[in-house]
Amino acid sequence: MAAFAAIAALPLASASAAQAATLTVDDDRAECPAATYTSVQAAVDAAAAGDTITICPGSYVEGSGAPNTNALTIGKSLTLKGAGADLVSISPRVTAQTGSSIAGTATDIRAGVGSIVSVIGTPTSPLDVAISGITVDGQSPDGRGVASLAGIVYLDAKGSIERSRVTHIVTSEGAEAYNRVGGWRGALPGYGIVQTSATLVGIPGERRLAISNTRVDSYNRAGILIDGASNDSAPFAPSGVTNKGVVRGSQVVGRVECANFEADGNCSNVGLLMTGPLFGQDGIRVTNNSRVEVADSLISQNLVNGAGAPVRPTWDSRNAVYTTQTTDNANLRLAAGIRLLGASLTNYSGANGQTIYSSATRSNITDNAYGVLNLAADGTTDVSGDPTSTGRLGNVFRAERNWWGLGYYRSSNAGPEIAPAANTPFPENPVNGVSTADGTGTTSRSVDFFPYRNGMQGDGFNGQYTVLDAPQAVEDAFPTVALSAPASGLRGTAVTLTADASDDFGVRSVDLFDGATKLTTLSAPPYTASVTLPADAVCGSTRSYTAVATDSLDQPSTSTPVAVAVTCPDDRRGGDNPPPPAPPTVAFENAPRTLSKATKVNFAVTAPAGFASAQLLLGSRTVCTVTKAPFSCTVTPTGADVGSQTLRVVVTDAKGSSAQAAVTVTVPKFATKVTTKVTSKKAKGGKVKRTIRTTVARPKGVTAKQACTGAHVTLVVKRGERTVINQQVRLTGSCTFTRSVTAPRRGGAFRLSAKYSGNAVLRSASTSRRFT
């Protein structure tokens, strides 16, 4: 009977899945004219559980901007699918010229208000929400900051965040930002991503939030909070829910030392702040029986600033050693790349053996005050276990095979220090606990870091990992299109052409062609047009029609040609019209499969009624027109052609009949280069202002818009082991930007890395250099 019940339920489940709908949003209906909604919240409100909301390129200002509200509230299980983090942004509304606050009086992230995006379920019915291809931005499109509690909050919810960006959660990162509502070092938590619960009752099971290929920066207290507590400060009390964050291929970057960017991109104050409120950041924070798995990621720049911040040692070049510096060493623990507070770490059973609930591996954990702190829920007491045990591991955090950085003047890599009594030099990253032997090395009983990557930074096998730039572009499929028309039509009368076009985001337009001649452009469904057959068309001739659909990223697809035969009425004598000559034919002689450069294409033509012309088209672009032999043409790809294209040749004879041949070709992305130019000039106080001009080159045939839309450059500048800049710059039409650093003349050379993300037209590229 149970088996019967399971079988009987299958049709119901299938019916439910089949009813899931896709709703499309476009803020200005430019990229997706057929979009039903212009705001994400409107689409969320209209959607049913299980639906997908596709978000076309645009800047979406959501919510009312009033205090104690969210910009976007999601109360059902949905999929939000953005066109790409460099193309889609969601930000709160600004209600005053000088900025505003949606946090209002709210201070508790479990209240369900005060955040930019809030996913709100119930303790017993958690939601499942997938978010991808979106930037959640605390700044309005014109650059004004809005104070909030967090960027994205999963409250009694699980799901995924993929290929996205969470940024500008603080309204300012300047030295005096704590005097502004929502500023760095201020009272608001300013988390990047949060998973938490509003319950006080134990609920079994694990709720997983997968964060992949996502960058979190410009936050306040912590970049990612995986929370199992019912309060926000130590000692933490358990909520009874086990949340789990799975962080893969992502970047969590705290406030860099060069944060006071002026309007021109200049940073005039390099270094940690030793004044103002004492404050530390955490990259990832995990509380009360919750869990985290980190892999292939970057956790960096979570440091202690303010009055009482630990004083870092300096290099004594005469004696070739670092000076010993213990001032305010206890405060080094105020910031960590990963902070565990009563987290769920391991388990052991005779039946299943060891189970690792929380871990970090194959990641760069560098430039943090502490690399990892494994503490009890009271926030101060070290917890530990036996990292070498084959049985019960206890409360040890498994953090093997990571790169922990390497001091600038050091020639060997001894791994992270363990609970140092003196302040560690750049790039810091100690771990807490007590040392213990581990095979051929030493590890900590609280944070098991052995084995680790023990080479120099540039060592591809044992040094710093190459972490995938995040977020990557979303994989946007080409549209599909099919054309239908009657098999024949009377000359001088109209026939109806109907295109069936669809896309995973949205169809921008459909062009209808008669042979190589564009008839019309349709911007919204139904994609139907009435076309009149020429009154002087030869009886029995054929017209060849095609449709070209273009999606929101200007990617085209071409339909299979449809032939319409031209018929004529009987003449006045009652006799039939004489039979027409045979229609023309055309075929490629050397059709390419890939077009990466200028390519000569040959084709063969027959035209019993006489040859008039042949036109070669790539997508909807006419490449050339040939009016006599030889039948050949050179095709040079442009930025508009990148992707899978239809290369077709249309031949027309002297009687007006047409025929065409088509092949599918691939136009690969263009290669580009990133160049940097550094200029220097004297500044006050014996300092030097160094200006870095970064440019993404535009290959021939690629416009500035094609090169820069939907792309960013990640700029990292280090001096010694100090990270001065780690910033993502979204490109504009010029494909060029500048950043400046004002710092003392002496202090070592700077190292620069600029990584261009790539987009739908250009491949990714990078450059690195040194400068003084």
Image: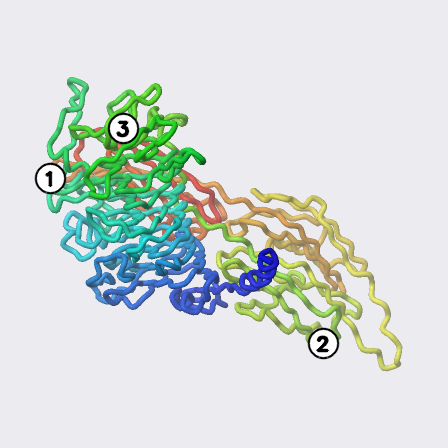
Q: Is residue 119 above or below residue 739?
A: below
Residue 112 occupies which quadrant of the picture? bottom left
Going 62% across and 62% down the picture, which residue do you hit?
547
Residue 484 occupies which quadrant of the picture? bottom right
Q: Earlier in the sequence, mark 2 or mark 3?
A: 3
Q: State if disc 1 and disc 2 touch (CB < 8 Å).
A: no
For this rendering, which residue is in front, 154 or 321? 154
User: How many marks can you see?
Assistant: 3
Q: Quadrant of the N terminus?
A: bottom right
Q: What's under tag 2, amino acid-wise?
A: Gly
Going 29% across and 31% down the picture, which residue do you hit?
385
3D distance between C-alphas at marks 2 and 3: 84 Å
Mark number, residue 308: 1
Q: Earlier in the sequence, mark 3 or mark 1?
A: 1
Q: State if disc 1 and disc 3 touch (CB < 8 Å).
A: no
Q: What's under tag 3, amino acid-wise?
A: Pro
3D distance between C-alphas at marks 2 and 1: 88 Å
Q: Is residue 429 above or below residue 159?
A: above
Mark number, residue 416: 3
Residue lying furthest top in this view?
A: 319
Q: Which residue is mark 2?
A: 492
Q: Is residue 103 left or right of residue 295?
A: left
Place of residue 570 in the rendered image (x, y in percent of width and height, measured from the top left): 84, 78
Quick one: SS at disc 1? Answer: loop
Crowd rating for badge 3 (residues with CA inside 10 Å; few <14, some 14–19, many 20+): many
Q: State if disc 3 and disc 2 touch (CB < 8 Å).
A: no
Quick one: SS at disc 2? Answer: loop
Whether residue 180 is visible, yes or no, is: yes
Mark number, residue 372: none
Q: What's under tag 1, amino acid-wise?
A: Gly
Q: Quadrant of the C terminus?
A: top left
Place of residue 127 in the rendered image (x, y in percent of width and height, measured from the top left): 40, 58
